[in-house]
Amino acid sequence: MRREILAAASATLREQGVPGLSIAAVLDRAKLSTRAFYRHFDSKDELVAAVFLETARAERRRLQRRMSGAATEIEAVAAWIDGRLDLAFDDNIKSDLRRLSLEAQSQTSISPSLIQPAYAEMLKPLSDALQRGLQAGVFHHIDPVNDAEFIQGVVWASINRQWRTGDCDRTEVRGDALRFCLRALGVALAAINQTCSTTD
């Protein structure tokens, strides 16, 4: 029953956004009672947070698969960035993920408590790679959790620009994001240039 509620909420959220999501609309779509809802969720906010968390877990798994072939932590960071750029440039990425990503991003300043667990879930593969790189001496003077958020901000700006204009060149966007982020992590210029010259 929880799965049916989450599926109905996810569909409603994609169509109407957080402001348009109501418990009644979700229950109507799922063909369930109010009692069924309150057996699994205490509030609309808890439901929204659960939808975002479920989506973030799927995104984390997708990013981990993208990163799995990385031979170095620098390559792992590049793979994470490439994976996130897929949202803007890869037509094979489901529009549902794109829509929910936009909706989640819109909630970061309005209701950070709704989105924070999902945000942390999606950033985990990146912060783990940053931690390993810090321990190995590849990255210097960084805070893996904060710097993962910083990298997400840089990449999100690129994603958003592509969604807005539709005329960005992926290779250029990728190169700009990698140079900016890897420089901030203290990566040597030669390694940055080598990483930027490889295609995702």
Image (tube, rainbow, N blue to C red):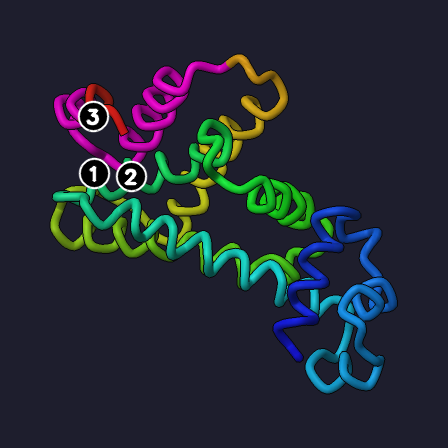
Q: Are the residues tagged 2 and 1 within 8 Å (C-beta)?
A: yes
- Nearer the observer, 143 or 160: 160
User: How many C-alpha atoms fall within 10 Å of the one at disc 3: few (<14), some, or many (≥20)?
Assistant: many
Q: CA distance from mark 2 to mark 1?
A: 6 Å
110 horizontally vs 77: left or right: right
Between label 3 and label 1, give the one nearer the viewer. Answer: 1
Kindly identify the residue that appears in the image at 57 percent across and 29 percent down. 160
Kindly identify the residue that appears in the image at 39 percent across and 47 percent down. 148
Q: Which mark is residue 79?
A: 2
- Nearer the observer, 144 or 20: 20
Kind of residue indicated by mark 1: Glu
Kind of residue indicated by mark 2: Ala
The secondary structure that dominates the magenta segment is helix
Q: CA distance from mark 3 to mark 1?
A: 10 Å
- Nearer the observer, 112 or 200: 200
Q: Position of residue 23 (x, y in %)?
A: 83, 68
Q: Position of residue 52 (x, y in %)?
A: 60, 58
Q: Residue 78 falls in which quadrant of the image?
A: top left
Residue linked to disc 3: 192
| Badge 1 element | helix
Residue range corresponding to the magenta coloring: 168-194
Query: Considering only vertical position in the picture, is 176 above or below 84?
Result: above
